Image: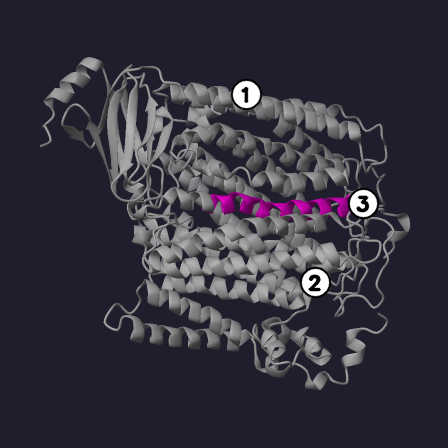
Amino acid sequence: MTDSDNDKTSLKSFFWLWGILTIVGVVLGLYGPSHLMPKSMSPNMHLTILTMVIFTVAAAPVAAGVYAATIYVLRNWTHKGDEPPPPAKPVRENGIIVATWVSISVLLTLFLLIWGLGALAEDNASASSNPLIVNVIAQQWVWTFQYPGTHVESNSLYLPEGREVEFHVSSDDVTHGFWIVQMGVQVDANPGVITTIHTTPNVLGTFDVRCEQFCGLNHAFMDALGDVVTPQQFSTWLAAQPQRT
Amino acid sequence: MTTTLEHTAVAEESQGGGLARYQNAGTAVAGGVLFAFLFWLIARKTMDPTGEAFNDQVTTILGCGWIIGFWFGIGAFNGPMRWLLGRDHSRADDLYYAGHNQGRARYWKYTTDHKVVGVQYIIVTMGLLGVGGLLAMAIRTELIMPGNHFVNQQVYNAFISLHGMIMILALIVAIAGPWANFVMPIMIGARDMAFPRLNALSLWTLVSAASLLVAVAAVGGLTMGWVVLAPITDQNGVGMDLFALTIVVFAVSSTVGGVNVVCTILTMRTKGMTLERVPIFVWGAITTSALALYAFPFFFLVEVLQLLDRNVATSFFVSGGGGTGWLQANLFWLMGHPEVYVILTPAVAACFEIAAVMARKPVFSYRTAVAAMVGLSGLSILVWAHHMFTSGWAPTLGGPFMVTTEIISIPTGLFFLVLIGTLWRGHIWMKLPTIWMFGFIANFIIGGITGIYLSDIPIDNQLHGTMFVTAHFHYIFVGSVLFGAVAALAFWFPKVTGRFLDEFLGRISFWLVFIGVQVTFLAMFASGLKGMPRRVSSYSVIFDHTNLITTIGAYIIMSGMLVLLGAIIKSWGHGEPSGPNPWHANSLEWMVPTPPPLENFDVMPVITEDPYNFREEMVRS
């Protein structure tokens, strides 16, 4: 064991460790979320993934600092054996350290808040005054999508690319959770209430709708398929659907 | 007081106790079963003789019968009834109730001695963790691959609901139950808790409530998740009524216990034991208890209203009748978020205590530690709606609740400052409690940071309701609170039993559980990021690898917990003798003999400084 009363114990290895772990965290942050999360098909999802990356990069030095300090403590100041080590030099207060620590956490929290509130405003901002309205009706354990203005009703969600969609979500029985996985939007489907979310699909291709609120026996199987198509294909599809009477 | 209760009452001892001489857990169960049957019979004959044998009303009344009969059987009503009849407890009676000279039998009785209650809480916690753990293994076994293989969806849903509820109960009492009862009164220099009989009441109401959860399974189970929010609860069978009753009684138990802890710390401290000289764990005990006093009445309320909705056709939470499920969601989370800190704070405080004693150094910035715990508790009552970001309820409140939630990271960060500051340049004695305490630090940073993601609404709009959330709070509950609980157990085990918790088995257990937690929950984060919802009995094939890894990790955790159980059983009877002060600490619980005598102190100690001045002369064995 290192002589633990030696105040000259070099902090160099601690800073090395901190730096290396921070780099590991930053790399994880840059590659992890975008690699693991579903491909983005809307500005909301893009913003979600970006925020994940930013937060992970911002958190990396904090977590790395705690890990580096813990490892450093374990390497330098531990004692084994059945006899207790002698008392260590007491340090009861260090106002400068506490003030520094609090200031840094306040600054980091402010950063998170400013970024988060900005992202929230962007998330909520409506891109268009003339969105496509889609009524989403949940029931155990099926999704139904209606396109007001037409009499079309479908169990798959077809959306045109590039146009804002406003979902009016409700439920026929219990609370469900309407979630478009690749677009990063969620809202509960409640009986007797209409909740709304909006997003703008910006990538062509299929996507998943899942229920994210526990809704009983077959909750695990309450999925629907979705497809983002070109506006022309969308009109063609809409016209070709059987009309609900 | 120069003569203690014990000395004056020896002669009368043989007459003490009265009815309590014949009461124990056995008569409690018998009383519960008898009353439940009688209540059921009367309800059925008088209310609806031709209806179902177990409809909502009849089942609720049956549950009330169990609770009341259990309380009669254990002796909870003896004291008040004797007071009413003008035959209040004599000293000999009090001595009998404190479990004097009753050997092991006192652990099965309505015993008022705080040390007996503490041990009873250890047993109850282990029982709950055992059942909840088996359910967790059943869940992970079902999720080993996509599709339903071992159990059907209905049984699976019952498993996740009971797993959630039992583990929440277990963790609420896991640290505050045993240690705020066993060691806290000795730490502050008290002969017992402020209200010894309420202490017994708190323990046995918990037992009566927790055992009702078994009955829930017997009457068709709870299959709607432990959060059980309307309107889906309407679809649950009568198990829902017994579940609601369990929570009502549990809220009584935690309120009684919380009042007792708060009053004890505020009024029972010995001479010189100022609030700045109490061991830091005492601050953890009082903040967690005070927060419980705020939080659990909401739980009580929400389940009482639920029972009314189900049994007498009110419609507080029924949207068709003018109520709303959002009312219930708000009330539930008004309880639900403070409750998380009711669970976490004692673990943090125990780790502070262990860090200081084992590093042979005072708690770094004691006042910061106090401020962080109090500040966290205060903030935690202002953040509940972050559980409802995606509910569609009051979207405009998203911003404010995001702000309050993210501010919580400031006091949480201070926990790390205090821990690392205490350990820095310490002389850290690497024994079992120290090792589990380090595990707490490593896991808590991951649990804490992933919570920040979820407090951010654009991220929550994607990750809410996914396995990411499950992994996040399991890093807190398993990775942090369970590690803190085992650290606390290893630390104070010698005071309870006079023996060390087996160091070798304890270390094996640590490594298994620590590695298991990383494997299980890191893979679960990946499942959640990929888009796997929570509470599902099956999943898309794209999640198969991460789920397989999670299940393997869960088995590693289980093997570690079994090793720990083996260590506890082995050490309790045959562990290495520890003596009264194995860690060479200064706080009062280590100054009394092991096991501590009834009423703890012959002469009341006078305190002149806090317990963290470790001196050379302390280190003699």
Q: Give the chain letter at badge 1.
A: A
**Residue at 73%, 61% in the rendered image:** B495
Q: Which residue is mark 2?
A: B194
Classed neighbour count for the residue bearing mark 2: other residues with Cα under 10 Å, few (<14), some (14–19), many (≥20)? many
Could you tell me how far apart the alpha carbons at marks 2 and 1 are, in whole angstroms?
Answer: 48 Å
Q: Residues within 10 Å of mark 1 (few under 14, many from 20)?
A: few
The front one of B132 and B412 is: B412
Choose the circle earlier in sequence order: 3 or 2.
2
Residue B394 pos. (x, y %): 41, 33
The label nearer to you, 3 versus 2, is 2
Q: Which residues are magenta?
A: B332-360
Q: Position of residue A133 (x, y in %)?
A: 25, 23
**Above or below: residue B228 compared with residue B61:** above
Query: For the residue marked with disc 3, what is the amino acid?
Result: Arg
Q: Chain of mark 3?
A: B
Residue indicated by mark 3? B360
Tag 2 and tag 1, C-beta contact below 8 Å: no
> Image quadrant of residue B408?
top right
